[in-house]
Amino acid sequence: MKRGIGLPGGREAVKDEYYISNLGVHPSAQGLGIGSALLKFAEDLACDAKLSKCSLIVGSYNQNAFRLYQRLGYQVVETVRNENPSLGYYRMVKVL
Ligand SMILES: CC(C)(COP(=O)(O)OP(=O)(O)OC[C@H]1O[C@@H](n2cnc3c(N)ncnc32)[C@H](O)[C@@H]1OP(=O)(O)O)[C@@H](O)C(=O)NCCC(=O)NCCS
């Protein structure tokens, strides 16, 4: 995968992970469980693909999303800090 903008940290995902990118729910439908259901759907696809981990990155400014991922079993495996706060992020992995 080639990105238009390089990330200040390392890789977004490693070989044995199913990488979840750009999760988003329309503001009018947030907080209704759709984001959680989409994550579950991605985790099922990962299992179908015989991968035992899901990974994602989340901006460190995005504490609501960060808490959701933690609650659903994702754990921080890398913290990338940057002098520009909007570029800092956590890489999180869930073992399925
Ligand atoms: C983060 C996001 C995908 C979660 O989807 P969702 O359908 O709102 O999530 P759910 O309804 O399954 O879960 C709600 C949880 O998400 C969190 N959350 C994040 N943003 C929220 C919002 N705007 N409104 C309500 N809950 C939000 C809350 O912590 C909530 O947890 P709680 O039930 O303990 O209060 C969605 O809020 C969103 O699209 N946000 C903007 C884009 C974004 O930040 N995407 C993540 C990029 S890594």
Image: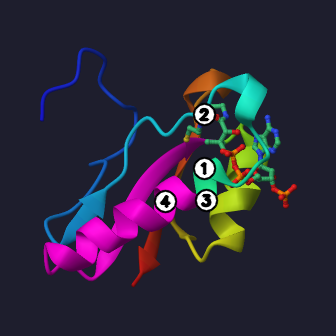
Q: Quadrant of the N terminus?
A: top left
Tag shown at residue 35: 1
- Give the residue type at disc 2: Val
Residue pointed to by mark 3: 36
Between marks 3 and 2, how big is the CA–CA gap? 10 Å
Give left or right: position of 77 versus 62.
Answer: left
Between marks 4 and 3, how big is the CA–CA gap? 5 Å
- Give the residue type at disc 1: Gly
Label 3 CB less than 8 angstroms from ligand 1 = yes
Tag shown at residue 39: 4
Between marks 3 and 1, how big is the CA–CA gap? 4 Å
Label 1 CB less than 8 angstroms from ligand 1 = yes
Helix, strand, or loop for circle 1?
Answer: helix
Residue at position x 33%, y 72% from top? Answer: 44
Q: Is residue 1 visible?
A: yes
Residue pointed to by mark 2: 25
Label 4 CB less than 8 angstroms from ligand 1 = yes
Between marks 2 and 1, how big is the CA–CA gap? 6 Å
Write down the region rendered in magenta: 37-59
- Give the residue type at disc 4: Leu
Residue at position x 31%, y 17% from top? Answer: 5
- Dot 4 and dot 3 residues touching (CB under 8 Å): yes
- Give the residue type at disc 3: Ser
Question: Crowding near pointer 2: few (<14 within 10 Å), some, many (20+)?
Answer: some
- Dot 3 and dot 1 residues touching (CB under 8 Å): yes
Q: Is residue 61 above or below residue 96?
A: above
Q: Position of residue 40 (x, y in %)?
A: 48, 67
Looking at the rendering, the quadrant in which ligand 1 lies is top right
Label 2 CB less than 8 angstroms from ligand 1 = yes
